[in-house]
Amino acid sequence: MADYEALLIISFGGPEGPDDVMPFLSNVTRGRNIPPSRLRDVEQRYLRRGGVSPINEQCRRLIDCLHTELADHAIDLPIYWGNRNWHPMLADTIAAMAADGVENAVALVTSAYSSYPSCRQYLDDIEKARADVGASAPHIEKIRPYFDHPGFVEPFARSTSQALDELGELGELGSSADRARLVFTAHSIPTSMAAGCDYEQQLREVARLVADRQEIALDWELVWQSRSGAPTDPWLEPDVNDHVRQLATEGVKSAVIVPIGFVFDHMEVVFDLDEEAAATAAEVGIEMRRAETPATVPDPDFVSMCRELIEERLEPGREASTVGHLNRRDHTCPADCCRPT
């Protein structure tokens, strides 16, 4: 059994009050030359919700469930939590781990895929935080991307089915042309970044797996949301709003949006989909529902998945649980993986 002394949960982080919002956004966009007017626009999205992002509370619920799950399976690992962009900050958490005498830890990132922002950047963040702490910082190994674990795919399949049920006759009856469309979404990234990783391929495989698990055959497409950066820079397309408008021109009456690129129902899901995409759908006459992400409640299968991923590291040689046609990603990423080309 591997000699790990702690579990470190690493997430994106989010503001928890009005005074947090702009400092949080400054952390997120540091070095990216985002115009102040753009930051003020995004700030208003948070302020309309009291300056609170849903992500931290959802992360706390997941950690509470993991405490119980690990205890029920006799896994004695204290759980630490550090964020990339807001408190508890990753470097502060690693400093606390060092002060507690932790020398080796396994890290679970709340992002399921392989790309620069969803994998490599977290690895870089870990090393930077360890360097900030100094020689006493624990050695930290990140758990593999888990997009292909059944504990990630099956909750999405169920929440998609529930959303289809909410559509009633619009989602289930009539000819193929009358049936609901499945619209799978993920955070867009620059095409130069996508060229250096398997992000899009992994997302398409998850979309296929979720669509195949529905009771009736439905047409689906993978589209993108939440793009930023200069308008002249090429990013993955089409945008979800453009796609919804296109569906309307094809006579589509209903759709379910499935945010397979996300673990939590955080701000980019709540604003970009529940507000903007929902408004676009209403504008063009499409009845829309959205599937819930697996860690929002969290789904018990997602919690069990986290424990199984930890057990993969605790017990070298343990058979990994995966679904789909893609090769399982190793726990140890090459030093140059997921770097933008």
Image: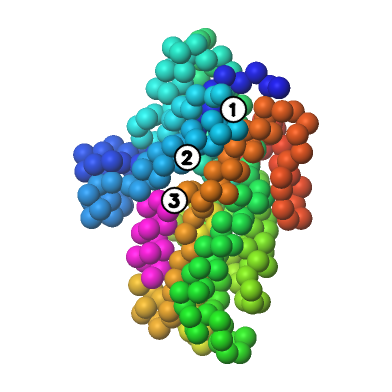
Foreground residue among 317 and 41: 317
- Identity of the amino acid at label 3? Val
Q: Secondary structure at mark 3?
A: loop
- Identity of the amino acid at label 2? Cys
Mark 2 — residue?
A: 65
Indicate whether 307 appears above or below 90.
Answer: below
The earlier-in-sequence mark between 1 and 2 is 2
Q: Give the residue drawn at x 35%, y 72%.
A: 279
* 202 horizontally vs 285: left or right: right
The dot on residue 75 is: 1
Q: Mark 1 to mark 2: distance in Å?
A: 13 Å
Foreground residue among 118 and 208: 208
Foreground residue among 226 and 20: 20
Residue 213 sits in which quadrant? bottom right
| Residue bounds of the magenta highlight | 265-278
Indicate the quadrant containing the N terminus: top left, top right, bottom left or bottom right.
Answer: top right
Main SS of residues in magenta: helix
The earlier-in-sequence mark between 3 and 1 is 1
- Identity of the amino acid at label 1? Ile
* Residue 284 lies in the magenta stretch: no
Residue 142 locus on image (x, y percent): 60, 31
Can residue 284 be seen here?
yes
Indicate whether 247 appears above or below 71.
Answer: below
The earlier-in-sequence mark between 2 and 3 is 2
Mark 3 — residue?
A: 297
Q: Secondary structure at mark 1?
A: loop
Q: Give the residue drawn at x 28%, y 55%.
A: 45
Nearer the viewer's eye, disc 3 or disc 1?
A: 1
